[in-house]
Image: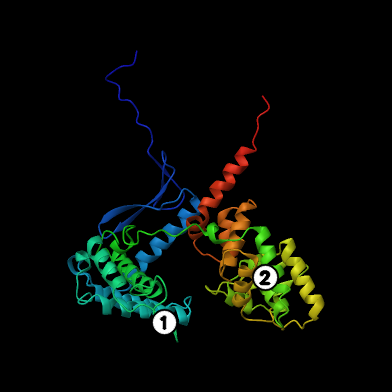
Amino acid sequence: MKNRTQKESKPVAWEGTNVGGLLRHVKSGTYYSRISVGSKLRWESLRTKLKSVAEERIREKKANRRKARMAGVAVRSGKMTFGEAAKIFLERLEKNPDISDATKIYRQKGLKKLNATWPQLAETDVRKLGVVAVRDWWTGMRASGTPYVPPGAKSAIRNSTGMSATTANCALEALRQVLDIALESGAMVENPARHRSIKSARRSPARKDLPSSKNFSAMVAVIRSSGAAAARPCGDMVELLAFTGARIKEARALVWDDVDFKREIVTLRVTKNKDVRDVPMCPELRELLTAMHERRKPEPGDSVLEVNECQRSIDRACKIAGMKRITAHGLRHLFATVAIEAGIDIPTVAKLMGHRDGGALAMKTYGHLRQEHAQAAMAKLKFNL
């Protein structure tokens, strides 16, 4: 019989890791960060059960803490105005070599629109900014503005009400990033602009708008047989984007010297984050590039693609093939979807696509595909008992 006076040992709730400040909740399997902010230890869920993703996220959090300390901003008694945080945001934006000039201009416009649609925001103490205030601003901003009227049209396009989604999202992202700086500095305990209730409409899973393998082949066949002068080059571009997962800008910069047929690797040198990355050739990509090379007999410095744009060809082909429209950038999502369905793990897919987050974004966008793949694989599992 158990001695009642003897203390029963409690089950272990947390499991340490070899990364400082990174712990795993044993029951849920979720990773948490434990980082000092000022004189307090802050616990925060990293919202992942993958250690590689958790390590990347906690490294980013630690780097943000260091940046906040190095900024040298005196936050007296924990106070910081939105304008002070915005000043740091603009300084970091200007000095960051990993952000393109176009992205910098986009984010500056977002901040400008934010200040224009939220009077007195710059002088407001960030601690006074809550979810309700942000939601009220978001709702009012979306309702403001003028619906888009195409050139030559007599009325606004259908479903165009108030400010465009692109402009509104640009301003919201600026608000989020500025308040992230206030959060890093210890002036806030949470970022209200990142609350899930601000934008109730969730992003649809990437798979819904993507063609099946049969439809994709039909679309490419329509493009190549259109009879247009650029029919074949446009077909080449469509397949190259789908087989590599490259962004349009990355594909345009490809030259034949970047194509290594011996190692079966395509090297993308001009990338969004300026990190050179290698994409192994799948059989379809190798066949495509071999046919293109034999047909053109190019020099090493010649561009792989003969056209810079293929969206018009895609739109026409989708209409003729009776399938849902897909964008050229959507072919990048098609690449990720096919790769995951083939059994490639999400961190590897993220690396092939040029993500730096260890798979966090890919997990958010394509996580449902991994679950579907796992369920399909388990359905085939049998035990011979």
Nearer to the camera, 37 or 288 = 288
Q: Is residue 228 left or right of residue 30?
A: right
Q: Disc number at residue 105?
A: 1
**Picture quarter with the N terminus:** top left
**Vertical arrangement, residue 71 with respect to residue 12, above or below:** below
**Picture quarter with the C terminus:** top right
Instruction: Estimate the x, y position of residue 330 in percent, counting from the top left.
Output: 56, 67
Q: Disc number at residue 240?
A: 2
**Label 2 environment density (alpha carbons within 10 Å; few <14, some 14–19, many ≥20):** many
Q: Which residue appears farthest toward the front when viewing the image? A: 154
Q: Which residue appears farthest toward the left when viewing the image? A: 77
* Quarter holding residue 286: bottom right
**Label 1 environment density (alpha carbons within 10 Å; few <14, some 14–19, many ≥20):** few
Residue at 73 percent of width and 76 percent of height: 232
Residue at 30 percent of width and 21 percent of height: 6
Q: Give the amino acid type for the residue marked by disc 2 in the picture.
A: Leu
* Quarter holding residue 39: bottom left
- Colour setting: rainbow
Instruction: Estimate the x, y position of residue 76 in percent, counting from the top left.
Output: 19, 69
Count of numbered tags:
2
Whether residue 304 is visible: no
Nearer to the camera, 316 or 104 = 316
**Vertical arrangement, residue 374 with respect to residue 75, above or below:** above
Q: Give the amino acid type for the residue marked by disc 1 in the picture.
A: Ile
Chain-order first, disc 1 or disc 2: 1
Mark 1 → mark 2, Cα distance in angstroms: 30 Å
Q: Are marks 1 and 2 in contact (CB under 8 Å)?
A: no
Q: Disc number at residue 248?
A: none
Residue at 26 percent of width and 59 percent of height: 189
